[in-house]
Structures are given as structure tokens and as C-alpha cells.
Image (spheres, coloured by chain):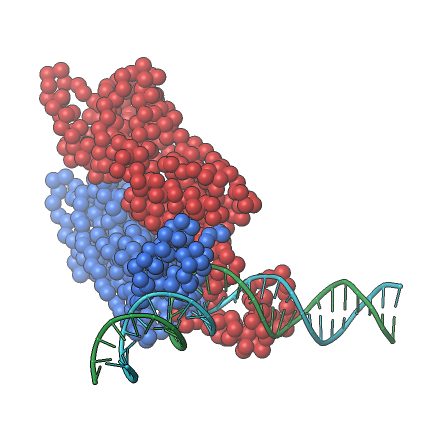
Chain colours: A red, B blue, C cyan, D green
Amino acid sequence: MAASTLTEVARLAGVSPATASRVLNGSARTPGPEIAERVRKAAESLGYVPNAQAQGLAKSSSGLIGLIVHDIADPYFSAIARGVQAAAREQRKMLLLATTGGTPEDEQAAAAAFAARRADSIVIAGSRSTRLQDRDGNAGLAAELDRYCRNGGRVGVVGHPVVGAEAPEGYHVVAVPNEDLSAELARELAGNHSGSFVVIGGPEGLLTSDDRIRGFQRGLESAGLAPAEVLRTGFDRAGGYEAGTVLAGRIKAAQATPSGASRPCIFAVNDVMAIGAAAALRSEGLRIPRDAAVAGFDDIETLRDFRPALSTVRLPLEEMGRLAVPAGVGGGPGGDGGTTVSVTGEVMLRRSTQAAAGAPA
Amino acid sequence: MAASTLTEVARLAGVSPATASRVLNGSARTPGPEIAERVRKAAESLGYVPNAQAQGLAKSSSGLIGLIVHDIADPYFSAIARGVQAAAREQRKMLLLATTGGTPEDEQAAAAAFAARRADSIVIAGSRSTRLQDRDGNAGLAAELDRYCRNGGRVGVVGHPVVGAEAPEGYHVVAVPNEDLSAELARELAGNHSGSFVVIGGPEGLLTSDDRIRGFQRGLESAGLAPAEVLRTGFDRAGGYEAGTVLAGRIKAAQATPSGASRPCIFAVNDVMAIGAAAALRSEGLRIPRDAAVAGFDDIETLRDFRPALSTVRLPLEEMGRLAVPAGVGGGPGGDGGTTVSVTGEVMLRRSTQAAAGAPA
DNA sequence: ATAAGTCGGGAAAGCGCATTCCCGCTGCTC
DNA sequence: GAGCAGCGGGAATGCGCTTTCCCGACTTAT
């Protein structure tokens, strides 16, 4: 890492480092044209690359935005990441990425690392958890973030506010109406499904999952139906598959019964779980939507070509990422004080929850 | 960003900054236990967060790894990114992410930005292009990267070496046998398909696409078949969809003909294109594999539940990302001199290319 | 008992850059 | 023609940290 320095450039150009700095990195004062030219040529011939670390140190601002996600290969997060990236680019900043697997401890570590790098802002995506085992982790994360805010950092959150965060100034949250959207989905589903409802949820305490479950039940209730049974499993494809296997067994058993019919409507709290469940049903010889209706949540882009087309709730993932990054310069000290911006989604009813052929309602 | 400094901690602990540094950031020399304790407590009470920029400046090493991809939301890249992230984590480094859309100019800019931040290594993924319009861009990128290498940086490349790169010391490439794997795929496909072959490729000059096309033709040839027609289109889902629409038209026209049969085997040079093509066929009322066989390349994880299951070539994407990040400390000056490590893939024949029912060969 | 060797700690010199302050110069006003 | 503002440039300081170098106090060998 022995690149040439500004001083070397200055010497070669026969000027002072101050002047070289002024011409190469633009300041209020612009040196004379031919001097500037000399400096530029010197820089060019030396292959000078300014040391952003030193610049950052000198002007105490790093031009970095930190992004914390559970797993960058998860399409939900990668879509958000794309939005964050786009926003960062607009702000002429670089993106620092950390993946944590979702444990508050790792998230705290990532936040600390970002703080250490003096990131101008930190964006944290991914469901918060209220599980008991995460209590300490959550507290640690909140403390880290609070400190970061107090030191002038801005944090953007997509989804739920960080559990236990105080110091709301500096926090910028993009709220997702998970509960309402789920309720709406449930109502629409209730409109054209006559069988029972089952929801495949993530582990208890995962806020996103819990919200979606609660909303779904509320929607069912407002449609005059009984609450759905809830199967708890992993918040990923494997979880969906597992639950799907269980459900497939039940469905087949019911079908073998004299009375015959049992065509449940399965709501998985996110698309990848829904896909997992669908795969499980299929591998058990069941068909969708004939033997079961299936719905998900998120409307993951890569999954849109899935057949039968998955009913789901479309979330503006990329937009959410974009909105989550706090505005460029930010207000003065004291911050823009706990902004909250809401996005909205849209229920997408597709083939996977269509009524069985010729059997309306 | 007015966090407390090491000096403040030192003062509070009643020691010198040197000592504080030694206890808080581990050096060869470890101060005495009770002094260390005092310093630690002082740091804790002040909420001290070391300034990584300053640290980087002082020890000239940033603990950063730069990753350049076309689009982080593309599952191909996000899988690689996961691998890179994992490797970075093992090396206790942070990941700097840049997405470029694939233009060499943007890639160069990203490389320069990484160099400016004194990233310890740069990983660049994504197909190289030899298109004429990219010549200057490629040269610029190569120059940027070469300079970075000369300054002691390490660059890791997944896929093709950067076009026009010299200074091979420092370059570390993960070679993907695209051509051979495509040939193998073609041979296996030839074994159980009797109709014509069509390949949907990316724009001419995209190395990855070209390699896969060339390999496929070679495989066909070695199976005693005539080369396939090649449709050029975009290297993404939209491109696949577009080409699929064209092909659907042809297939339907041929089916309407008295002679009837025309069941082409379509090879799209990557999975998302294949999915796009499949979607197009389907929206034209065609079925897979009944009316056409379809194969892709990459074996994107999110697409594995797609039905009919897509025949493809599995690439160890995550592993590729992991391998692409140059080893931690690296050899002495002079570098580890142009390492190349190869990965291998595996042809996955699945339902989408199965012979039409009851019609072997 | 003295000399040589260690160990724990501090002073100070950078790392590469931005920036404030200062200085000599030109061009202007009165 | 003397005094002044304005401008282009350089010297010097500091950002927060690491690291050499140095020094006193201790332990150990002769």
C-alpha cells in the first residue's frame, strides 16, 4: 500500500502541499490555472490516489454508509441493499456491508465497527426480535446505536425500530404496515376461500413475523372467520418446507377420509417460506391451488415467475432501502429528530390462491 | 461525529496515550494488569470507540475488502457476495460494496474509490466484455487495477481475468470452466433430445456468455450435431423473456404446420434468462418440457423450486466468492504472483429438459 | 556489591491530508 | 504617490492513532 502522497505530487510540481491539496481536492480557493495544470500533470504521472482515510481524518467525515442485513444472499435483503446502494451513490458515498445472521450480538458488533469507521450513517434492516434470549443482545445493540447517534451519527431502520432504543433523535425509520397489509390479505383471501386457514409463521418473538400473523388473524376475524392455526417454524425456506411437509400429511389424511374435502389456505409469512411450503406440498404429490391455496408476503422479484403464481403482498423493497438512508448532510446538531416515513404495499392475488375450478366462494 | 478520543481516555485513566493504545488495541507489549483495568474502565465510561480511520492511517492498512458487482440484487452476485462476506469475516475485515451495472467505467471508478480507501484487496465479479465500445473502459479499469497492484494491493477476480491487465502479480483469479461445462451440458442434452437446439445468449462480447455459447456448440459438435442457432439478447431476465417470445412464435407456427413436430431445446446462458424464456413460452400457452426443453446455467438457489425444475449447471457461487478474496496477509512484497484457482461445476439434468412423455431419444 | 539485562511506562515523531494563518504581491482609491 | 483591500501562495498545525525510542526501576548473573 505504498502509493504516492500529496506531498510527493506537490514536490514534483514545485508547489506546496497546501496548493496541491487545493487543486486536487477542490476547496474554496482555486489556485491559478497554470499552477493547477502543473499539479494535475504531476499527480497524473505519479499515479496519485488520494488517501481517503487521511482525508477522512482531516475533515472528520468518512463518506461511508453502513448497511446491516441478516443475509445478503436472501432476495429480500439484496433488494433492499440495492436501494440503499442507489441512495448511497446519489450521496456520493460508499457502502459498507455487514451480514449478521440476525443475532443482535453480531448486529451490535457491526454497528460498533461502522461507528469505528465513522460511517456517516448506519442503515439496519431485518426483523427485530423480542425473544428472551435476545434481550441482552438487543440492549447492547440499542446502546451501541444510541451512542452512535449521540456522537452525531444517523441511523436508518427499515421495519421495526430497534428494540429498546432511546435517543430517538437521529433515528430514521421506514415503517412497513405489515399488520395492516396482512389483514387486508386475509380479508381478500377470505372472500374467495371456503376452507380452513393455516399460517406458517417464524419463531415467536420475531416482530415481522408476529405482526403479519396478528394482522392475518385480525383480517380473518373482521371477515367473520375463526382465527387460523399457527405453525411456528424457521423464517426461511427450510422452515416453510418443514411446515409444508406437516401440512401435506394432514391434507392427504383428510382427503383419504370419507368426507373428503380439506383444502386449506396456507399463509406463509414471507415468500421464501411460502415457496418452501409449496415445494413440500408438491413433493408429497399435492397440487396448488387444487389441494391447497398458498400465499406469501414480500413479492420477491426472483420468485415472480414461479408457477402457480404466488399470491402475496408486494412491498417496495428497493424503495424501502432507498428511503432508509438518512438524508445527506442532515440537519444541524440535534438531528432531524426521529423521522418516520411509511411505505405501503399491495395485496397481489394470483393463481396460487385461486378457487378450485368452478367452485366460486 | 465527536466521539471521545484515545487521548481523553488516557487522561482520564491517568496514563499516556501510548499506554492506552497498547491496552485497548492490543500490541506486542501488554501493560500491567491494574493499569490495563483502569484504562479499560475509562474507555468504557467514556464510550470510547476507536477511530478506524486514524488507525488505518497510522498502520497503513484499512481492514477493508472491496467488492465490485454488477447488481447486488441479482441472485448470482448476491450468492457470490455472501461468500466474499464470509471470507472477509474470517479475515476480520469489513466489506465495501460497489455496484456498477457492469460498465467498465463504473468499475474503474469503484476500483479507484477502493484504492483511495486503501482497501487491502479488491474482488471484482461479473462478466468481462470485449465489446468495442468497452475498449477504453477496459483499458482504464486495467490501468486502475494495475496501479492498485503495484501499490501492493491484491485483486481477486471471479471469472475472467480483467481484459488487458498486465502486472499479473497480485492478481488472483477464480477460474470458472464455463466452456467445458457448457460442452458437457450440450452433450448430455444431445443424448436425450432429438429436435433442434437454440441458444439464447447475451450480447456479443460478453465473455461469460460467449464462453458458454462456444462450449455448447463444441459439445453439440462432439455429439455429432449441427451447431445451434444463437439468439443474442440481454444477459438478464428481460432478455430471456424477449427471446422466449420470439421462440414461442416460431414453435407455434411450426406446430400449426402439417408436419407438426418442432420441439426445440433452448439453452439460455444463465438461469435468470432461462426463467425469463420459460415465462415467455408459458405466457404464449406453451408448456415445458412438452413443447420445448429449457436449460440454464448457474443453478441459482432461489430458482431451485421453480417448476418444471430447471436443468442447469451448478456453480459453487458462494465458494467462488470465498475463494476470490486474496489470502489475508499475503506473501511478501512482490506478491503471490498471479494465483489461479479453479472451481468446478456440475451438470444438473432436471425436468425442464426431460424427453416428451414416452418418447425416448 | 556492581554490572548487565528486562520490563513497564512516557515522550515524540510521524501516517497523509485539510485548513488556518500569514506574507508578499498587484491593483485600486483618494 | 501613499495606503489599502484583495489575491495567490506557503508554513505550520492538527485530525486520532501507532510505534519507535528512551528512561527509570527492577531483576538477575558474576
Residue B56, placed above or below residue B350: below
Q: Quadrant of the C terminus of chain A?
A: top left
Q: Residue at x 31, y 42 (%)?
A: A137
Q: Quadrant of the N terminus of chain A?
A: bottom left
Query: In this view of the protein, which residue sits in the foreground, A341 or B214?
Result: A341
Q: Residue at x 14, y 25 (%)?
A: A250
Q: How many marks?
A: 0
Residue A109, placed above or below residue A168: below
Percent coordinates x, y for residue B331 in the rendering: 28, 72
Query: In this view of the protein, which residue sits in the foreground, B128 or B361?
Result: B128
Quarter holding residue A217: top left
Whether residue A171 is visible to the viewer of this picture, yes or no, is yes
Q: Residue at x 27, y 57 (%)?
A: B90
Q: Residue at x 43, y 47 (%)?
A: A148
Percent coordinates x, y for residue B51 in the rendering: 42, 57
Residue A261, placed above or below residue B284: above
Q: Tell me: A339 left or right of B268.
A: right
Q: Tell me: B280 left or right of D12.
A: left
Percent coordinates x, y for residue B184 in the rendering: 18, 57
Residue A56, placed above or below residue A3: above
Query: In this view of the protein, which residue sits in the foreground, B205 or A173?
Result: A173
Whether residue B225 is visible to the viewer of this picture, yes or no, is no
